[in-house]
Image (cartoon, rainbow, N blue to C red):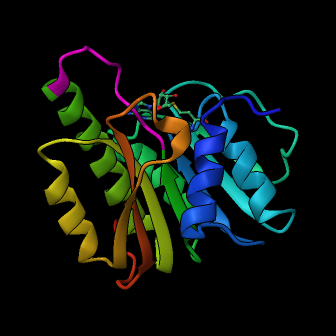
Amino acid sequence: GYRARSAYKLKQLDEEAGLFGPGNTVVDLGAAPGGWLQVAAEAVGPQGRVVGVDLQRIKPLDDHDVVETIRGDMTDEETRARITELVGEEGADVVVSDMAPNMTGEYSLDHARSVHLARQAFETAMVVLATGGDLAVKVFDGRDLADLREEMEGEFQYVRSIRPDASRDASSELYLVGKHRITAPVRTGD
Ligand code: SAM
């Protein structure tokens, strides 16, 4: 079994958008407790790599030769640097983010925080995702979504929004999926 029901959302995203292939390197942001890590590890197989990042500690997985984890805050620049270093020169084939803010119940605030996290994921992808790679990022629907989508459209061949059946109960949640990055990774540091 999977550690989280959200595993089925990632399976559905993969079926609809064709995210993963054998041997891929995947970066999973907001990865605790690890359901998506399990799905991604299965999909990339023994030649692949999956790097999971979360504020929370992630208990080691059985696929520990494929999955590596980083405990860190994605709003902290240093975490992005740690990911880039771990992934290495070739970059990632896929970046996924299931990050969500702590819910306050105030819709506009939860939406704004969710878009902020989605933007962190997008900016991280712009550093670590190889040309041709894909990005799937969770965001709560609302006002600021159009701007983020437009920015993504400038970086990918096309962008789709997908609402997996498995997330129907959380009706405002959707995933923006950017397919086939057309730009080159942003170089940082030096
Ligand atoms: N996809 C995961 C799975 O299948 O097990 C579930 C992810 S859960 C819906 C959202 C996660 O985002 C939480 O574990 C939370 O700690 C993480 N998160 C929220 N804000 C974050 C941040 N700033 N940096 C890193 N992780 C964050």
Position of 6 compared to 189: left or right? right
Which residue appears at 34% of the width and 70% of the height? Answer: 159
Q: Residue at x 16, y 57 (%)?
A: 146
Work out whether residue 119 or residue 88 is closer to the camera in this orientation and state it. 119
Let me know if residue 119 appears in the view.
Answer: yes
For the N terminus, the quadrant is: top right
Q: Is residue 47 above or below residue 105?
A: below
In the image, 157: left or right of 25? left
Q: Position of residue 100 (x, y in %)?
A: 39, 32
Residue stretch in magenta: 98-107
Indicate yes or no whether the magenta region holds residue 190: no
Picture coordinates of residue 182 (x, y %)? 37, 85
Q: Give the quadrant of residue 187.
A: bottom left
Instruction: Say which quarter of the image contains residue 43.
Output: bottom right
Measured along the vertical axis of the image, is residue 39 above or below residue 131?
above
* Residue shown at the point (18%, 41%) measured from the top left: 142
Q: Magenta stretch: residue 104 in it? A: yes
Residue 187 in sight in this render: no
Q: Residue shown at 34%/83% (left/top)?
A: 183
Frontmost residue, 74 versus 111:
111
